[in-house]
């Protein structure tokens, strides 16, 4: 997924600004998109909840399908190999006991969104780095669905969900997914402590 990328370059950016955009191999992103499409056809998506397992469609109304880190499916196995490379790199660079990864496919149908939030819980927080891998082809700015990040209510990033892009950021950053005007697909996840 990351090829010969020097991940430390991105970790430097996270240190400086709290986030980084990493290129993802397009062929691999296409494999993940194919897997997501299969899961949609198999009706494997459920409405997403919030951290305390409640559903508040005024805050988020996307659909998700969790990815098992012991999946036998080829593209998902490959995904976790790459994510574990990323996790070990973050662990060593930031000297944190990062031991776990959780991830899910996300589908935002037309007019769906996820309002401003942070991925860190105030109780028993274990998420320290968040990532989103985009699986959308031919995305246009007018399609909406951008991820926006904020620091002290100032927008620090606004990124189109184009296939072949991955955003990696500190989970403490406030962010949102703007309303989509066409179906939006991604993989979202977190790198965590025990």
Image (cartoon, rainbow, N blue to C red):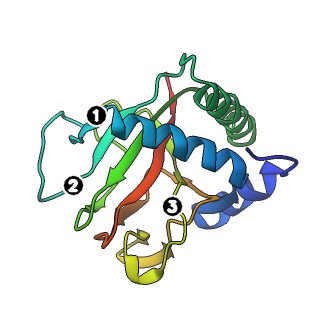
Q: Determine which quarter of the picture holds residue 174.
A: bottom left
- Mark 1 and mark 3 lie on one chain; the one further toward the N terminus is 1
Q: Farthest residue toward the right?
A: 4
Disc 2 element: loop
* Residue in the picture at 35% in, 40% down: 40
Quadrant containing the N terminus is top right
* Residue in the picture at 28% in, 70% down: 179
Question: Answer yes or no: do the residues labelled 1 and 2 have beta carbons within 8 Å?
Answer: no
Q: Position of residue 49 (x, y in %)?
A: 21, 40
Viewer-proximal residue among 172 and 65: 65
Q: CA distance from mark 1 to mark 3?
A: 20 Å
Residue 175 visible? The answer is: yes
Q: Which residue is tagged 1? A: 43
Q: Nearer the viewer, mark 1 or mark 2?
A: 1
Q: Position of residue 124 (x, y in %)?
A: 33, 30
Which mark, by number, is residue 60? Answer: 2
Disc 3 element: loop
Q: CA distance from mark 1 to mark 2?
A: 20 Å
Q: CA distance from mark 2 to mark 3?
A: 20 Å
Left or right of 111, for residue 58: left
- Mark 1 and mark 2 lie on one chain; the one further toward the N terminus is 1
Which mark, by number, is residue 18? Answer: none
Question: Dot 2 surroundings within 10 Å: few (below 14), some, or many (20 or more)?
Answer: many
Which mark, by number, is residue 136? Answer: 3
Disc 1 element: loop
- 78 to 106, vertically: above or below: above
């Amino acid at each position: 997924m990351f090829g010969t990328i020097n991940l430390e370059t991105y970790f430097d950016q996270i240190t400086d600004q709290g986030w980084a955009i990493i290129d993802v191999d397009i062929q691999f992103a296409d494999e993940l998109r194919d897997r997501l499409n299969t899961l949609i056809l198999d009706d494997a998506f459920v409405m997403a909840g919030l951290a305390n397992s409640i559903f508040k469609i005024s805050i988020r109304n996307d659909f998700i399908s969790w990815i098992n880190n012991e999946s036998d499916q080829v593209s998902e196995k490959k995904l976790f190999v790459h994510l574990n490379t990323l996790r070990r790199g973050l662990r060593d660079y930031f000297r944190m006991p990062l031991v776990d990864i959780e991830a899910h496919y996300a589908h935002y149908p037309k007019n769906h969104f996820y309002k401003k939030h942070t991925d860190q819980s105030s109780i028993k927080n274990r998420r320290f780095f968040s990532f989103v891998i985009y699986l959308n082809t031919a995305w246009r700015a007018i399609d909406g669905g951008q991820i926006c990040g904020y620091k002290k209510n100032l927008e620090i990033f606004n990124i189109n969900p184009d296939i072949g892009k991955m955003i990696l950021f500190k989970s403490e950053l406030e962010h949102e997914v703007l309303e989509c005007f066409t179906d939006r697909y991604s993989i979202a996840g977190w790198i965590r402590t025990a």
